[in-house]
Structure formats: C-alpha cells, structure tokens
Image: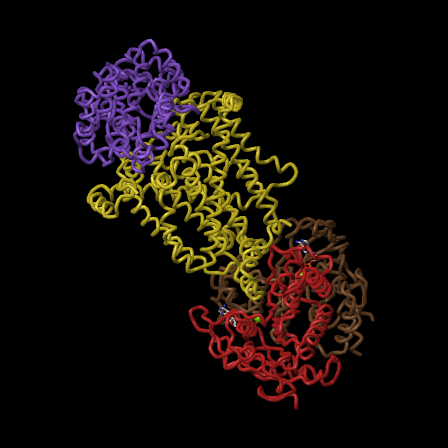
Chain colours: A yellow, B purple, C brown, D red
Amino acid sequence: MSEQILPAPTLVWQTLLELGEDELWWHLSISLQRLAWGLLGGVISGVLLGALLGANPRAERLIYPTFAALAQIPTLAWIPLFMLLLGIGEALKLVVLIKAIIVPITVHTLVGVRDIPPRLYEAAAVLRLPPYLRLWRLVIPAALPSFMAGLRLALATGWSSLLAVELLASSEGLGYLMVWGRQLFMLDIVFVCILVIGLLGVALDRGIQFLDQRLVFWPHPATAEFRRHAGGRGWQRLQPWLLPLGLLALWQLSVQLHWVDANILVAPLDVLHTTWLGLLDGSLADAMRRSLGRALGGLLLGGGLGLLLGTLLGLCHPAERLFGPTLSALRQIAIFAWVPLLTAWFGLGEGAKLVFVSLATFFPLLIATQRGIAGLSPQLGEAARVLRLNWRQHLLCLVLPGAAPAIFAGLRLALIFAWLGTIGAEYFMPSDGGIGSLMIGAQQLFRMDQVMAGMLLIGLTGALFNTLGQLIEARATRWRTA
Amino acid sequence: QAVEVPKEIRIAVPDLSAGSQHSGGGVVDVLRTQRIFEQEFAADGITTQWRFFKGAGPVINEAFANGQVDFAYLGDLAAIVGKANGLDTRLLSATARDIKSYLGVVPGSGIKTLADLKGKRVAVFQGTAHQLSFDAALDSQGLKERDLQVINLDFNAATAALAAKQIDATWGTSNLVALQSRGLAELPLSSNDLNGAGSIQQVLVGSGDFVDRHPQLTARLLKAQQKAVQWLRDEGNKPAYVKLIAELASYPSTILQTDLENTSLHALFAPQLDQAFLERLQHKVHLAARQRLIRKGFDVQGWVDDRFLKQALGQQSQ
Amino acid sequence: MNSLISPDASKPFVQLPSIVSFEHVSKRFTVEGGELEAIREFSLDIHEGESIAILGSSGCGKSTLLRLLVGLDREFHGKIHVDGKPIDGIGGECGIVFQEHRLFPWLSVEQNIELGLVNEKLTQAERLHRIDEFIQLVGLDGFQRAYPHQLSGGMAQRVAIARGLVASPRILLLDEPFGALDALTRQQMQEELLAIRTRAGITSLLVTHDVEEAVLLADRVVVMEPRPGRIKRIVTIDLAHPRKRNHQAFQRLREELLFELTSDGHAITHTAAAPVADRQ
Amino acid sequence: MNSLISPDASKPFVQLPSIVSFEHVSKRFTVEGGELEAIREFSLDIHEGESIAILGSSGCGKSTLLRLLVGLDREFHGKIHVDGKPIDGIGGECGIVFQEHRLFPWLSVEQNIELGLVNEKLTQAERLHRIDEFIQLVGLDGFQRAYPHQLSGGMAQRVAIARGLVASPRILLLDEPFGALDALTRQQMQEELLAIRTRAGITSLLVTHDVEEAVLLADRVVVMEPRPGRIKRIVTIDLAHPRKRNHQAFQRLREELLFELTSDGHAITHTAAAPVADRQ
Ligand SMILES: Nc1ncnc2c1ncn2[C@@H]1O[C@H](COP(=O)(O)OP(=O)(O)OP(=O)(O)O)[C@@H](O)[C@H]1O
Ligand SMILES: Nc1ncnc2c1ncn2[C@@H]1O[C@H](COP(=O)(O)OP(=O)(O)OP(=O)(O)O)[C@@H](O)[C@H]1O
Ligand SMILES: [Mg+2]
Ligand SMILES: [Mg+2]
C-alpha cells in the first residue's frame, strides 16, 4: 500500500515527536475538555431520559419512536437550526456532542431500567422504599451493567463526534487536527491523532471496564418475566403519534408566528410538498432506495459480525483477553478516519460504503452481545453445564435467549447507527446517489425544504425500522410477555 | 511498446452537483455529455470511468495514492497538496483559470471591501482551496488572517451560519450566488475586483505511472479533450453551457448566468500552461507553504508535463 | 368435632373489628392462550390480631391470594378490604415474606434487612440494634456483611424472614417462610414468630405445607382446594398457647386437617389414599 | 441400637463396588475477607444402587457437597472419585436437581424437561412419550406449554424434578427436591422416586430437612454438623421397602435421627432443647 495512505510507523513516530513538541498537547487538552463536558451533559441527560422511558411504558410508547427517529437524522441536517438557536460558540459544539452521546446512553439505560427483575421490583414496592431508596437500592444497581455498556459506546461515539464538532467553528482540537491533516493529505498527522485517540480511548475504556467489574460484583439473577407489551394495546398503539403531531404543531406555529427564519425552518406544508414532488419525479424515492440498501446491507454484515464476535468474546475469555483491547482501541477511532483505508482496501464503489456502514453497526452489537453474555445468570449456566448441553444447544437454549434483551438493545442502536453511517458514507466517499448526497446537495444551495424532506423521510424510515425491531424483539422474547 | 492496453481509464472529478446527477463543471461536463472520451477509446475496447467525489480534494489524492484513478480534474490546492506530499502526478493541462471567488456577507452589514472585514467573523473552510484563495485575496490587500476573526466552517455550515447571521462574512464560490438570489447574502466583492487575486485555477493531472506507461493514450486523451475545450471557448455556446450545467448540477440557471456574466469563456477555459498560469500556481505553492498547508514548497516547472498538451494544441493549429 | 366450624362461625375474635376481608374474590390468569381460574369466590374475614394459616396443595392459589392482598396485582374480581377500605395500591399495613427470598443481590445481609426498616422512624442506634437483634434471631451472626450469593438456600430464606419481620407490620403475610429450613431451625423460627406476633399484636396470614405448623401457629386454618383454588373448609384451632405437639387435641386437629387435605378433589389422584389411612 | 453404625461399617452394599467415594474432602469459601470452612474432612463411600440421605442444619454444606460431586466446583481439598476415577469436569453419570428450580425462563415446561434428555439417544416419538410420562408423573398435565413464571413455586420445583429424573442418570443428586410441596404431593413424589430408583437401579444422594423422608427413602442417612460442615453420624436404615411410617422401627429411627440432629453443636443454641424432649 502506498506510503501516503499507510505511512510507515517510523514516520508516524517522527510526526508524533514533532507535533508533541508544540501543538499536539494543546489540541488534546481542548478535545478532552470538550469530550468531558459532552460526556457529562450527554450522560446525565441520557440517563434521565433512559430511566424515564425504561420505568414508564407509556413514556416509552410516547417518546421513544420519536427519539429514535430524530436520532437517526444526521447532525449535518440539524446544524442550521442549531446555529440559529445556539450560535456558533461552544454551546453548539456541546449540543452536537450531547446529541451523539445521548443515544447509546439512553438506549442502554432504557433497557437496563426496563429489565429490572420484576420480582425485586415487587419486593421494593412491598417494602415501600421511598423513591430515593428505590433509585439507589434497586434501579441503579440493576441498571448498572447495561448502563456501563452504554457508557463504553458513548465514549467511542464521543470521540467520533469530536470530528464533526471541531469542524464547526473551531480551529483547535484533535478532531480539527485530524480533518485538517486529511484535507492536506498528511495522513501521518491523521495517524498520530488516531494513535493518541486510540491509546487514550483504550485507557478510558479499560477504566470503565474496571469500574464495571468493581461495581457489579454480584451474579446476575435470571431475568424471567417482563410484564409489558412494548407496542401497547388498543388505542395505545396510537400513542407514538402524539409527540410527532405535537412537534408538527409547534413547527407550524413557529413558522406562522415568524419565531424562526422561514429560510431555515421551512413550513411543514412546503416540506410535504417538496417531499411529494421528490417522490413523484422519483429522485427522492430513488435516493431512498439506494440509501436503504446500504443501511440494511451494512446492518446485516456489521451487525451479524458484531453478534458473532460478541458471542465469541463473551463466551471465550482467552479471546476476550486477546482481542478485547485492540477492539476497544479500534472502536475509539472515529469512523471517518477509516475512510482512506477503506477506499484503499475496498475500492471506490459500493463495497467500501457497505464496509463503512458495517463498521458503524458492528460495535453496538459487539458490545451489547458481550454485555448480555456477561450478564447471563450463573445459576442457569450451571444448570446448562450439568445438563451437558452441547455447544449448539448451549447457544440456543442459554446464551442467545439469555442475552436477547441486551442484544436487542444493541440492535436498536445499530439501527440508528446504520443510518448515520449511510449518510456519512455518502458524504465521505465517491458519491453515487442516495439520500445523504441529496441532502448535502440541497444544503449546498441552502434549499432547506429539500433538506427537511430528507429529514422527514429518514425520520419516518427510522421510526418504521424501530417499530419493526420492536416487533421482532417482542416475538423473539415472547416468554417475557406471555 | 509491449505494455498491454488498460481496460479502462479512470478519471476522478470533484462533484459540484447539488442534485441527484453528477456534475464537475466546465470541461468535464462537456466531455461527458458529448461522450468524447468514450468515443475516442471505444475502438480499443477501453472504457472510460468517471468517478465523482464529494468533498473532493483529500479523497481524490487518496485515490491517486491507492492507484484507483489515472487522471483527475482538480482545483489548484488539491493538486498542489497531492504533489507536495509526494504523489507522482503530472500537470497535464489547465482546464479553467481565474474561477471567481466571492465574498458573501450578511445583508445590510455594510461590508464592502476586504478591509471592512477587520475584526469581523469570517467563515472559511480551513485546509481547502478556499482558505488558500482567501489568503491570496487578503494578501493582495495587505491583510492577514490574524486581522480578522477567521472561523473554520465547512461550506454547508458556513452557508447555514450566514443564513442564521452567526457570522459576518464567508468566502466561497458560485454557491454563494444561490444565497444571494434568495436574499440571504450580499456579494459585495469577487476575486475579479481584486485583479484575480483569490481566484481558483483548475488543472488536469495524471498519475505518473499511467502517463509513463501509456504516453500514446495520454496524448489521445488530451487531444480529445480539445474538442470539448473548443466547444466551450466558443462564446456562442454560453447559453447552452449554462443550460447544461444547470441541468446536471441542479443549480438554478440564474446563478450560473450571474456567475458567468462578465466572464469570457474563451479566457476561462484556455488550456495553455502558459507563464501567467504557472506563476499563479507557483504563487499558490508559496502561499500554501507559508500558511503551512504543505510542508515545503516546490517548483511548479518540475511538475509540468506539457508534451501532450503541446502536441494536441499543435496538431490543432496545423 | 367441635373444632370444625363453618367459615362464619364465632370465636373470641368476633367482637374485634375485621381488619382484612375478602369478598368473593376471583382471579384468572391467561396461560397458553387459555384461561386459568386461579382463585374462585374466596371469602374470608380476618380479625385484628388473628392468625390464619392457609393449607392447600401446590398450585391452588395461595401465593396469588397473598399477592392480591398486598396490592401487587389489581386485576381481580370481588372485593378486598383492609381496615374497611378497599385496597388501593400497596399500603403500609402489610408486610410480606415471599415464597422465594427476593433479596437484593447487590446488598449485604445487613443492608437487605435494613431495607425492612426504611419506613420506621428510628434513630441510627435503634436501627442498628434492631438489625442486630434480628440477625441474631435468625441465627446469622457472622454473616452480616455476606452477600446473598454467598448464603445457602436456608440462610437466604432466613434473611428474607428477618427483613419481613424487622418492622413488625400490622398485617404479616408469610408464604412458606420455613420451607427450606431444617427441623430444628424451623421450630426455633416458629417460636420466635409466635413470640413476636403476640408481643406486637400482629395479624398474620401464613401459607404453609406443614400441617403441624398450621396447628401450632394458627387461630384458624383455611384449607384450600385446587383448580380452581377455593376454600374447602375453615378449621378453628382453639388450643391455648403454648401448644404441645404431643397433646391429644393437637394430634386430632392435625389428623383432621390431613384428612381434609387428602380426602378428595385433589389434582393428582393416582395414589391419593395412602397417608391418612396409614396412621391409626 | 444396631442401626447406628460407624462410617466404614458393613451392609449388603459392601460387596458391590463403590461408585462414589469422598476422601477427606474439605472446602473453604472466602466471605467478607475471612475464610469460611464449609466442609471439613468429609469421607464417604457410596455403593452402586445405594441411596443416601443427607440431613443437617441450614448452612452446613450439603448443597456445596453436591456441587463438588457433580463437578461444578473444582477447588477443594481431598479426593472425590466416581467409578474409581477422580472427577474431572462434569461427567455424564450425575444428574442433579438443584435446591432452586433453575428452569430456563424462556423455555416452556415441556422444553425445559426436554433439556434433560439432550444426551439420550431416542427417537422423536420416544422422546415425546418420555416427556409426557414425566409431566403426568409430576402432575402438570395441561401446563406443557406454560412458561416458568406462570407456575407456582411448587409447580416449578416439580418441573425441575421431572427434568432431573427424565434421563434416569446413574447417580441422582437431589437437593431438597420436595421442599416446596404440600404433604400429599410430596408423598406421591417420594413414592415415584422410590419406584424409579429401584426400577432403574439408580444410586441416589438426597439432601432433605425432613427426617421422615430420610428414613423413608434412604439406605443410609448421613447426619451433618455445621460450622465447619462435617459428618456427625451415619445411620443405616435396614428396613424393607415399602416402609410404613407408623411402624415402630421407623419411628424409632426417626427419633434417633432427630436426637442426633438436635443433641448439640448446633449453631442456634438458645432454644435447642425442645423438640425431642417433648415427644416421649
Ligand atoms: N459461593 C459461596 N461463597 C461463599 N460462601 C458460600 C458460597 N456458597 C456457600 N457458601 C457458604 O457455605 C456454607 C454452606 O452452604 P451450603 O449451601 O452448602 O449449605 P446447605 O447445607 O445447602 O444449607 P441449606 O440447607 O440452607 O441449603 C454456608 O455457610 C454458606 O454461607
Ligand atoms: N403470572 C402468572 N401467569 C399465569 N398463571 C399464573 C401466574 N401466577 C400463577 N399462575 C397460576 O396460578 C395458579 C396458582 O398459583 P400460586 O402461585 O398462587 O400457587 P400456590 O398455591 O402458591 O402454589 P405453591 O404451593 O406451589 O407455591 C397456578 O396454577 C399457576 O400456574
Ligand atoms: Mg406459592
Ligand atoms: Mg442447600
């Protein structure tokens, strides 16, 4: 491979030394600061939101589909609106970071809180624990393992989003340095950044893991029942529409009352009109088809691999010791930093895009699966051993069903990441049509109606995916609602 | 020569399109719609692969390094950066010169000249041709980036920031005209007003490997390119050209009309690697080195490989 | 057999107000798409300070009944009143020891027991003293800081008992609390329970499979029949405390109850005759 | 008292090869930073086809012993041989019914029981027939497709028993299998167990808290003492089957065992005298 694409280690080392003498540490400190604030904000808000959704089925029905749909819309499309509301200072960067970090935290907290063993929940109810004790003695310890998985992903997501953030009105930070290095085709600088981020990421990741092991010292009880119907019954099925409708009303209102510049926030009707036109002339529909193909293909490939490798690492401790650190280092590396290597290896066509999306969906499922397997009840594990199940039965009767709730949490995230990855791939790689290219093009001319038409479609598909995912989850874990 | 004939010629182009079709602007779109290369090489069983890249510069250089493209139509900085970082590229032809850059300002801000920008917030995408051209523009007025508050924003973010009035001005190309036409920006100044300082040049570069191995093909390519160039340089084709680009790039044709209003297509698309053009390039190299966009400068003369262009132009004049 | 009295019959408790009353309580579950009638038309008045034992074969709805009373399951037919008011959520009157221990795996023995005290107004010293007292009582001294997964089955159950008893609730529901204990520990626990109950005037509802235990501890024994779970008979135990197991009246009541339990209507029928017939 | 024999004493089993042998087995746990000696110097030979019952107070190491034998815990001192070979991982000889049911929550009753058969070579029809037979046996007809959380405590335990018995392992370990069952169901289960055991010539190790059950089912009863868990006494039950509970020899053995259990060395001492003294 060409030395420009994959610079020799010695060159990278030399660059590291050079940069290390002056600006590197400065960039690093700024990035760390941003990351810290972003994590703080994202984790706090994610935990609150996740806990609310997890504890309250109605809240989940009301809010989660909208949350998932909004999370799927790439940051890039939000930026004009964010800028209008937040200016271009640190607040904007913080919000963009938080938007990225909140997603894994919310999803994993939601699942953790939702899956509190109902028997313990009842015990707490009967003991009439006051709310703070219920939180402190029941909810937090029970949701902790799941939350930790979310935190590990959030860390990686945080690093990745630094890139996007530091392109926004910033001339400092590791993310900036990395993009700048790539712009100027000095990939040795990019590699130095990757190295620093990777090392720091591993350190932080291992820290979290250590904390996880210290904090979660009890064997996990077998989660059995789960007295909830995710989709709701009867008119409850309509509840997910309430929030979007409310938002729509707010949107229309703010346009009508001129709260927001109509150039930036286009009226809903205009957006619908543009969407309709786009669908009619086939441009939107075609772009959607292409993007959907990439997203689904990547999800299947990356998610499948993540599931497979997660199962392997979860079941086989030597494998975890061998690959764990490397994988957690790789995870921290902003996915965009992969682009040069991916195009080198997989060409300029669909292949590289597929791999790119796969990469985005790989880690959520990897981590979730690993977490799910680590959280298997040791009592049931012993039962399985004593019954001398062979590996296949072990997998089918113990591991997969036991880890299913966690795996589905990973799937929820992977669905979101698949979309984000698709848009990213269309942005960073040779364009070949797709909803992402379309939106970027529209933004070039500041056609916000088209951008928002794209957002609308992505959001709708996201909501659809999400419903589908929940249906599959409900079917696959039928025992919990039976 | 015993070198086997390649199956395909791969040409990289930055995608300027805002729609679902691709557009590289200028000579590229003419070449493509008239299928000039395709016809030229059809007889040899060689296909032509057009590769369009968004956010072009870095990706195309990477593709060069990966041996995934043979030729590229590039803006000056991207080409310079590639060369400066050790890519073996050859400067084969100029494809457009003095492409206008604009200063876009918030309507009613009262900014008329670059000097008015002192202390103001100006968005520039750092590490791109725009930064370089902006620096050149400032340089021509004796200003420095330090004199203003330069904010790093990519094009789309800069557009958004301008619309949201979060910045006072930005430096960019024809997409700013789109903002102007919608009343979101004023364009008080372009590089034309600065005697071309801050304008952007466009070139055709080829990979050294391909050029050395297939000089004949390269020569034929440049010769074929002349067909498009000739069509383009014919002022009578201006409306047709505007229509073509508007269609491919999904730009409103008024934008392009405005952009090209006082521009002579004959001058704009002159392919010659003449002294003036090379000086402009050399100046950019110096500037880039000074701004630390490249590690060290180089001599443009050593980069030029105008054998094929001369051949093409010579044959034509005969 | 004057000790066999129909449900509405009288005892000293009749003068006291009824603290718990079940009126025609029925409960259905959905299993495998079909309906399962877990409890049918269960009616019972329990008086303040009274001690009820519930006997019945496995799966006859005993645990379900307790869950209904404590307010964990609100979907049933009929009425349940506590203190004259229909139950409405989980009230403060009832304490329950579940059939499984349900200890919090992340809390030590001490901390688990402490959770039973959260609604008591006590100083820290009193609290510690109470916890310590109950740890002694269930014989787990030395395991204060052990976690549930480090305990044996019986030890975990004893922690759960301590957690349920430590706050002396007005109504105490016990679901086979001594099931996993050896005979000796069991007897000690029974005696402690008796002592606590009389000392604090607690009303109690004890589910058990041990007929002797029922006769030993209860004022009235409710014998249930399975599928659907319903009352078969209510037997009043009018023996003075302390009751002696080898006392004749004790033995007679015990055999009566055993007979009730096994006489008929039992789900598993193929060997149903043996046990009572064997004893003379 | 010729029935009280020291551990190495003889019975018909002496001729038969010993299938399980414990030699000076000791086991320690770490609790709260300190060491806990769960088992000390446990030695016992079990002969093919023999049936052993283990009696002992809560926490004296019975479950731990079974875990060691089945190969779930390899960190102990001393030697355990099965078939003359030191245990090495989880062998196919032992089947175990745990103290808690440990059913797979995502599998129906049927599927859970089927897991007990995974290592048997059976046709599908035989398999289904076997499963059905055992579902009948534990009285859960109609609950084939119910999930564990839809069962009552005793029903879940019965499913676990069915899962443990369905494959007729050569050595069967039962950890208080009938703890949560009512008296009648319990007796039926005991009889079924006896029948299966003799039919298939199974060697069994039964942990129980019910002295009567021990006398009813075992050839030898091991009485254990707690803290550290060790053998206090081994009592041989040389009564012919079917044993009658009201038989005199039966009663005598029962009381002997009760005496052994309560005489001294028990962890909870404050009320230790009562039970045996009461019965004349
Ligand atoms: N994993 C463990 N870690 C630490 N200590 C343990 C662990 N498992 C058991 N023990 C301790 O070992 C001792 C014996 O436990 P075991 O479960 O064998 O008792 P048991 O005889 O089965 O009691 P029970 O009749 O109550 O079930 C107990 O004191 C218990 O605290
Ligand atoms: N959540 C549930 N869903 C469906 N059926 C249930 C549920 N809980 C209990 N049942 C059914 O209700 C009946 C009564 O159960 P319950 O737990 O009250 O029995 P029990 O009398 O406590 O039995 P045991 O002595 O075995 O504990 C059983 O047949 C059981 O299958
Ligand atoms: Mg029960
Ligand atoms: Mg035990």
Q: Is residue B90 left or right of residue D251?
A: left
Give percent across and percent down for residue B130.
27, 26
| Location of residue A210 with respect to B51 vertically, above or below | below
- Whether residue B126 is visible here, answered yes or no, is no
x 60%, y 72%: residue: D173
x 49%, y 79%: residue: D79
Q: Is residue A441 left or right of residue D217?
A: left
Q: Residue furthest right?
A: C1
Q: Residue furthest bottom?
A: D2
Give the camera-side residue of A466 and D225.
Answer: A466
Give the camera-side residue of C250 and B237.
Answer: B237
- Whether residue B211 is visible here, answered yes or no, is yes
Give percent across and percent down for residue A2.
28, 41
Ligand 3: which quarter?
Answer: bottom right
| Location of residue A4 with respect to D258 vertically, above or below | above
Q: Residue furthest top?
A: B236
Q: How many marks?
A: 0
Q: Residue furthest front?
A: B2
Q: Quadrant of the N terminus of chain B?
A: top left
Q: Quadrant of the C terminus of chain B?
A: top left
Give the camera-side residue of D186 and D17.
Answer: D17
Q: Is residue A290 left or right of residue B147?
A: right
Q: Quadrant of residue D137?
A: bottom right
| Location of residue A337 with respect to D145 vertically, above or below | above
Give percent across and percent down for residue B93.
25, 23
Give percent across and percent down for residue A90.
33, 35
x 66%, y 51%: residue: C73
